[in-house]
């Protein structure tokens, strides 16, 4: 079964459109699962038109998962600008009654001679229209964008192959060869609304029909896709009557169209038959397709996660710090109990959760450290830990207990109570995964909130870049690194960085200095992602001086041998600290007294009126691009090289 699921189409719930769908689709917030049938659009200012959703989620309001392996387009009025094909003229020339499909009318003519004559005339009229055809706005850019993702593309049309090829000659940037398959009436499969052409195209494209996305402007496309089991998108920028849907309240009223009207619009806006989605413009399609494409290894895309987080309610007064992009910990106000004096403020509860997936070497201790680091960044003291262990089938009891003892020892070293969790052997994983949840406490006055960032604040980094990535790669790729020239002494030096993975002390010292406005630990995605997350969470731009970023010699060595960029390397062990300029020396001195190195690497810029992080960089005063990595450099390297 595909990710989208095999579906009995006659059992589908109907599509619920807003009452004004035939006029416009208003943009609204995305990601609210409280409505299974809704109109959804991007955040204000995103520049993208709204998309109407029926059952499948387009951004974060996902009600059912789906997968897109190929896209099949209708041609006329979908890839071409509407109006080139004059259906009224064709009907007059062929004496086709209003409401009767043209191909079906021809097939029903009484003699072979009449059918042949009508078919010839239809071919002539289609070719005339093809000479006038122009690409629909965004069609060529859309096809190129989908091609860049590696998606196979096709065309399914009731027209002749010759008319499609002639029309494509009017497209400046597209040709028939840009489509892996073109299915026309010349292919001798029953035309739409039958689903045979959809199933045939799926076979030709080499994909499961349930993972084929059919995009068209008319009810025949919806019926054909539904019949075959494909995903369906109705492109309709105007009146739904043009798509073959009529308002049931107007039944019996002559319709101002000669095309078949087979669908219904009910008073509540429901369409029957129902497409999976309705879009207003082809430029809306990439966002929809994106939701059905496989994700690369690494963090979930920040924009999608942020949209989901923004949809969550924030009206609970006990939540002092709730979910937000770039914020790894929540802060909860604990209600007073009888054990507190009436004048005593109970501590704030800090809660965070993080999995460890990259390494199997001392994975239990790693899970404790990264979760403790998250809690510490809000000024809290990590106190209680819960661990969920998932191990692959075939694991032995000694392997499980080794991880559990690693968790226990790490908690003991950090003064953290191991309170419970879950341990399971499952075929859902291929190597051990430890997911932790850490709880800690902080006074309300001691809570460090990234929203306190101000323009002009200094940006400091403790220790150096890619502490975790350096020791992790030395553990996972030791043999490969030695084959490439790294000595045993160099590997040992990399392993020794494991002792620097904790930022609990860094954060506690920084939080004790007045004037500290924000802290953020460097984790997956490296310094490049961490500073972007800090900017997004604090709603301020950040400028980084590239020449000031410190690197360990061991990190430089591994980066050179493996051809990786240390700025994209997972970096637990380094803490980003923002503080008022007047507090900068005090913070650095306090850290230095504790034996913790720190470096000023930049400053906080102007406030942002949006939630997207903005990071600019300079190198000796010259502007340079701030790097971006689709996946952490560790994930990229580990996927390409043998471990050990």
Image (spheres, rainbow, N blue to C red):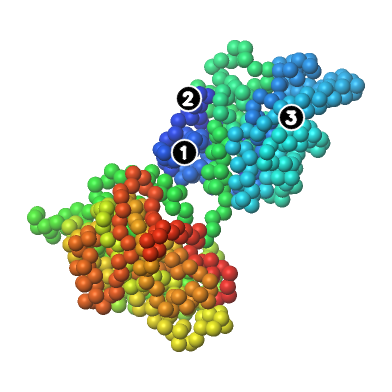
Residue on which disc 1 sits: 47
Q: Residue at x 44, y 63 (%)?
A: 525
Q: CA distance from mark 3 to mark 1?
A: 32 Å
Determine crowd level at label 1: few under 14, some 14-19, many 20+ residues with C-alpha closer than 10 A.
few
Residue on which disc 3 sits: 130
Residue on which disc 2 sits: 19
Left or right, residue 549 beside residue 95: left
Which of disc 2 and disc 3 is earlier in sequence? 2
Q: Residue at x 53, y 80 (%)?
A: 481
Q: CA distance from mark 1 to mark 2?
A: 24 Å
Q: Residue at x 24, y 75 (%)?
A: 592
Residue 70 to residue 504: above or below: above
Closer-to-camera residue (376/409) = 376
Q: Give x and y (percent) for residue 391.
A: 49, 70
Quick one: SS at disc 3? helix
Which of disc 2 and disc 1 is earlier in sequence? 2
Which of disc 1 and disc 3 is earlier in sequence? 1
Closer-to-camera residue (517/134) = 134
């Amino acid at each position: 079964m595909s990710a989208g699921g095999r579906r009995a189409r006659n059992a589908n719930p109907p599509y619920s459109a807003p009452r004004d769908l035939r006029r416009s689709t208003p943009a609204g917030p995305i990601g609210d699962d409280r409505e299974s049938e809704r109109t959804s659009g991007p955040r204000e200012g995103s520049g993208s038109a709204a998309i109407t959703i029926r059952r499948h989620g387009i951004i974060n309001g996902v009600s059912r998962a789906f997968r897109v392996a190929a896209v099949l387009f209708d041609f006329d009025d979908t890839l071409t600008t509407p109006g080139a094909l004059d259906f009224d003229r064709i009907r007059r020339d062929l004496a086709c009654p209003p409401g009767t499909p043209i191909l079906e009318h021809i097939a029903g003519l009484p003699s072979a001679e009449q059918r042949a004559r009508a078919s010839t005339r239809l071919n002539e009229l289609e070719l005339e229209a093809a000479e006038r055809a122009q690409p629909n706005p965004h069609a060529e850019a859309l096809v190129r964008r989908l091609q860049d993702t590696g998606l196979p593309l096709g065309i399914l049309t009731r027209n002749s192959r010759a008319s499609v090829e002639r029309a494509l000659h009017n497209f400046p940037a597209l040709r028939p060869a840009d489509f892996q398959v073109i299915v026309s009436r010349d292919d001798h499969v029953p035309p739409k609304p039958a689903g045979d052409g959809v199933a045939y195209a799926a076979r030709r494209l080499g994909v499961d029909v349930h993972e084929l996305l059919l995009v068209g402007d008319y009810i025949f496309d919806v019926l054909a896709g539904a019949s075959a089991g494909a995903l369906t998108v109705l492109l309709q920028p105007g009146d739904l009557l043009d798509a073959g849907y009529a308002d049931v309240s107007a039944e019996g009223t002559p319709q101002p169209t000669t095309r078949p009207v087979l669908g219904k619009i009910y008073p509540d806006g429901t369409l029957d038959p129902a497409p999976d989605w309705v879009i207003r413009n082809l430029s809306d399609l990439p966002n929809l397709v994106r939701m059905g494409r496989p994700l690369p290894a690494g963090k979930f895309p920040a924009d999608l996660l942020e949209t989901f987080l923004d949809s969550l309610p924030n009206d609970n007064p006990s939540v002092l710090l709730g979910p937000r992009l770039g914020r790894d910990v929540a802060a909860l106000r604990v209600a007073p109990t009888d054990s507190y004096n009436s004048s005593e403020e109970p501590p704030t509860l800090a809660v965070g959760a993080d999995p460890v997936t990259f390494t199997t070497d001392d994975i239990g201790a790693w899970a404790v450290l990264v979760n403790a680091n998250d809690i510490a960044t809000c000024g809290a003291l990590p106190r209680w830990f819960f661990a969920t262990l998932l191990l692959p089938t075939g694991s032995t009891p000694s392997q499980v207990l080794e991880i559990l003892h690693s968790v226990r020892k790490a908690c003991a070293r950090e003064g953290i109570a191991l309170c419970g969790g879950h341990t399971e052997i499952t075929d859902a994983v291929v190597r051990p995964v430890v997911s932790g949840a850490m709880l800690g406490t902080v006074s309300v006055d001691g809570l460090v909130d990234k929203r306190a960032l101000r323009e002009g604040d200094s940006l400091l980094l403790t220790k150096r870049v890619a502490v975790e990535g350096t020791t992790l790669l030395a553990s996972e790729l030791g043999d490969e690194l030695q084959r490439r020239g790294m000595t045993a002494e160099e590997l040992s030096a990399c392993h020794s960085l494991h002792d620097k993975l904790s930022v609990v002390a860094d954060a506690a010292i920084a939080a004790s200095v007045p004037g500290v406005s924000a802290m953020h630990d460097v984790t997956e995605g490296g310094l490049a992602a961490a500073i972007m997350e800090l900017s997004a969470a604090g709603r301020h731009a950040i400028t980084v001086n590239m020449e000031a970023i410190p690197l360990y010699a061991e990190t430089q060595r591994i980066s050179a041998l493996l051809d990786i960029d240390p700025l994209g390397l997972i970096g637990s062990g380094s803490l980003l600290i923002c503080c008022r300029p007047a507090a900068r020396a005090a913070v650095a001195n306090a850290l230095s007294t504790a034996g913790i190195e720190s470096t000023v690497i930049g400053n906080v810029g102007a406030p942002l009126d949006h939630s997207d992080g903005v990071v600019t960089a300079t190198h000796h005063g010259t502007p340079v691009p701030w790097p971006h990595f689709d996946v952490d450099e560790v994930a990229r390297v580990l996927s390409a090289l043998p471990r050990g």
